[in-house]
Each structure stands twice: as structure tokens, then as C-alpha cells.
Amino acid sequence: MFLFKKTDPGVRELLKTAKDGVVVCGHCKEEIDRKELIRNYYICPKCQKYLRIPARDRITLIADRDSFSEMAANVTSVDFLKFPGYEEKLNKARMSTGEKEAVVCGVCKIDGISVAIFAMDPRFIMASMGSAVGEKITRIFEHATRYHLPVIGFTASGGARMQEGIVSLMQMAKVSGAVKRHSNGGNLYVTVLTDPTTGGVTASFAMQGDILLAEPKALIGFAGRRVVEQTTKSTLPDNFQSAEFLLEHGFIDQIIPREDLRDTIVNILKLHSRKGETL
Amino acid sequence: MIAYEKLKLARQNGRPTGSAYLDELFTNRLDLCGDRRYGEDAAIIGGIGYLGDMPVTYIAIDKGTDLDSRLKKNFGCPKPEGYRKALRLMKQAEKFNRPVICFVDTLGAYPGAEAEERGQGQAIAENIMEMMGLKTPVISVVIGEGGSGGALALCASDRVYMLENAVYSVITPEGCATILWKDAKRVADAAECLHITAEDMVEYHVAERVIPEDFTHFKRMCADLKKVLLSDLAVITQNSISGMLENRYERFRRIGIYEEAAGKYGNP
Ligand SMILES: [Zn+2]
């Protein structure tokens, strides 16, 4: 079963550079051909579970071909508190992902419409938000405010990055200030909540979109499941803090399967294009 | 072990809770209840009163003083309806041009199942975003514990004061120790690593003032705090609304320590 639509340019782009070989599905442990997985939008063809998508691939999947231009690419974290293990964690994440930080930001076109975009990378210290992530996302909102661009944000995060102490908590307010200015300017912000979006990111820009979309079964919440279980002193239902749970409780607009995401976002962008702008 | 000593003091039984400050600082108090959405959260006390001769809106997280009140107030861990009540009162303050004074003392936002069902993350996110654009002055005083997002939801302000032994942290030291060393008992080490003291907050531009503690002369201490609040409010309101919002934006905009150098960690 291939979900790949012939009209979807992103999959084709990813396939061009994809290495041959197999990856092991973290859910069913089956070996999957890497190209088959990409053709299937990183959905395991064996067990149908949504695998996490690297940030750069996210952007390639949705952006028009060769339209992405990265911004704030060289902003990187510093271990300014000399926090135990942080330097090693950063180095390991940089080596294993090839990314400098847990978020990739920039501008691109989607079906010809200019947007600002950011995608968080859960492979990078669980995409926790420290100074660098906060700075990059703030800059992309400031840029989008200045040029009246919509922002499309793919969230995934373990929350604030405790290795940067209180400074990481303050990034929530810093980004929120930039989101507020962008919103005051009459600009559109669409968040796509992906697995897992938790903690301080849920409690700030993940929930501040005009339109909130989520991927099927994505974990989305504030407190960690174990903490909630200890507090509530009972076992929680399986779907607790899932995208479906949030939809049921009125906290997101829609759950969109990956193969329909680009079409949905194009439609949202068109519905928000200003008078006099060409589609 | 300064951080750990301060953490213990910040959590100590008998330390004045939010309501003690409201009693001392404000006259003609009118407490206002409910979020108009779901319910009333006793963990957050809000209302209107005079600070000197100026009507202000007060919002205080209160941990309670005995077992009964502590249970009722969830030990000062607010639920979404508490944060939504706070936002309602802040918007009301904006309408009537009243400054807002917040008192913060929480281990963190309540992490129960019903809080998640009612959108704890969304409630905090909305508070922070709306505070960043609130067209009236806001001063927040961390009187005990400033626990993570649950504290920040009342601290996206023009000024933040730390009481001398108050702490402010991205995560509880217990939580941090559990993640780092799989040992919640290494609280003291975690507290040290996280940099949670009032002096740390001033160093990282998270707070502007450290307020000396003198609980044996609590009346006098609050009288001094009132003077400081009034004089800072006078400074903030000298500015235009847009100037005040610009300063509030910049207050957070400049927080962050990072490097920016091309090619330092090249892609493989
Ligand atoms: Zn699988």
C-alpha cells in the first residue's frame, strides 16, 4: 500500500536523496525499506503507526520544490550553566541528526503561497526548547510579522530544556510575545501538533495557533502521563492525551492524516489569502 | 547548598501565603470568583482593592494554611479554571485601566487528569500570550515557589520581584533529579544545577528586584513592598501604552544565551 500521491512534490524530492537500505520500525520492530517508508509518508507499512519525521523532511514534504530558504540556521545552544551531561547531549544530538538545533526555520512557498515555517525535530534532545530554539522561533515570527506572512509550525517537544534552567522557561514568554504581535498584525498561524507535543511547548506556542491541526494518535499534553497517574492515583485510559482525546475535549480543530496534510494546509492558506493577492 | 536551603525556606510551613499579602497590601477588597467557563478554583484568589489610593486588580496563588484549606486549594496548584479566572480579571483590569499585581507561590500547575481534560496547557499558553499584549501594567511578586509554566502563567509581566528566599524554576528539583539521576532524593544537587535563587533571577534578567524578608515584622515588610510597588507603577505608567508594551516585549526578547557562528558544527 502506497499513500503517495503523484501530485505531491515533497515525496519525490525526498526520494531523490534517500539512501537505500532498511529502517526498523520502533513500534512493530519490522524492517522496512527506507524508500517505501518515505513513499508512505513515514507511516509504517507493516503496522500503520506514524513514525516521527525529521524536521527537514517535514519541510520538504510540504514546501514547493526548491522554495525553502533557511533562516537563523547558525543559532546554537550553549551550556552556560555547566549543567551535568548537557554538552555531551548536545554533541550527540548534533552528530546523530546533522542538525545544529532542535528546530529548523525559514520561508518557503506552499502551492505558490509564501509562508514562514518551522519544524521541530524530536530526534534532537526530544526537541526540548532552550535559548536557541526560542530565539529561532521568535525570529521566524518577527520575520513573518514584518512581511505579513502566515506561519506554519510543526510542533514536537518534550517541553522546556531544563539544562538551561530558568532561561529556557522564559523562552515560552519570548515566543508568545512574538506570536501575539504576529496575531495582532492580522496574520495567520497554523500549528500542526505532532508526536509528542508536551510541557512548556504545549503551554505556549503549540496552543496559540489560529487553527490547530494534529496528526492521528499524536501524544499532546501538559503534564507527563506518569505524573498525572501519580496525582490521580488511577490508571488512565489508553487514549489519554492523544490527538483524538484533545479533539473530543474541544482543544484542536481537526486530526489530519499525513497524506491529506498538504492539501488541507493549501486550502487553509487559500481561505486566508488577502484581497488583491493572487492565489 | 544555598539553593537547597532557599528551596526549603520557600516551602516552609508558616511562611505567609498569598492571602496574607492581600490582607496587608489592599483595602476595600472585593474578591471575584469563577472563570465563567467551568468553575471556581480556590487555588487562585482574585479581585479588586486599593493599593494606597489606587484601585488595582490582585491575583494571588494561595497554598492554604491548614490541611483543610490546603486540600481545597490543591496545595496551591491551580487548575485551568484558575488560570482562566486570572485572565478574565486581567482583561477586566485592562478595560478599567487598573494595574494588575500578581502573587506567585506554586509547585506548578495541577497535573491531574481533569486538568489535562480541560486544557491545562492551553490555559497557560493563552495567559502568557494575552499578558504579552495586556494594555495595563502588570507586576508579579514570587513570594515562595515559582514553579515552571504554572508560575509563568502569572509572570509575563512588566516587572518581577523575588522575595529574598523565593525560588523560580523551569522544573521542580525533584523532577529534575528523577530525570537526571533516576533519584528524586538528590533534590539538593538538582536545585544547585538549576539555578533557582532570587540572585540567579536577577543575573538572568528574569527579575528586577529582590525583596528582603522579615516575617516577624510582616506589616512593616508589606508596607515597604507597597511603597516599591507604587513607585514602580508610577514609573511604568509614565510611559505610553505602546511604549510599555514595547518594553515588556523587550524584557523577554533579550533573554536567551546562545551562539551564532556559521559552520561550527557542519552537517555530515
Ligand atoms: Zn511498524
Image (spheres, grey):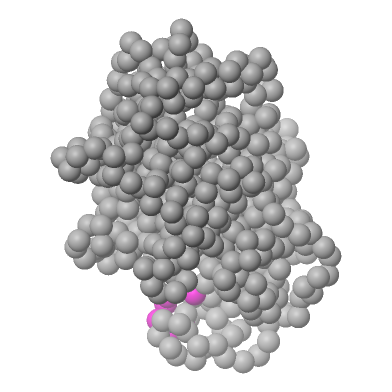
- Front-lying residue, B254 or B135: B254
Q: Can residue B161 be seen in this view?
A: yes
Left or right: A238 in relation to A273: left
The vertical placement of B199 against A195, above or below, is above
**x, y percentage for residue A193?**
49, 57
The stretch in magenta equals A45-51
Q: Residue furthest top?
A: B53
Name the dominant secondary structure of the magenta segment.
Answer: loop
Left or right: A217 in relation to A3: left
Q: Quadrant of the C terminus of chain A?
A: top right
Q: In which quarter of the image is residue A145?
A: top right
**x, y percentage for residue B155?**
50, 37
**x, y percentage for residue A15?**
67, 79
The vertical placement of A41 against B112, above or below, is below
Q: Is residue A78 magenta?
A: no
Q: Measuring 57% from the left and 91% from the top, which residue is drawn there?
A: A22
For the image, the number of numbered tags is 0
Q: Is residue A195 visible?
A: no
Q: Measuring 76% from the left and 56% from the top, which residue is drawn there?
A: A72
Left or right: A54 in relation to B175: right
**x, y percentage for residue A155?**
54, 58
- Front-lying residue, A2 or B48: B48
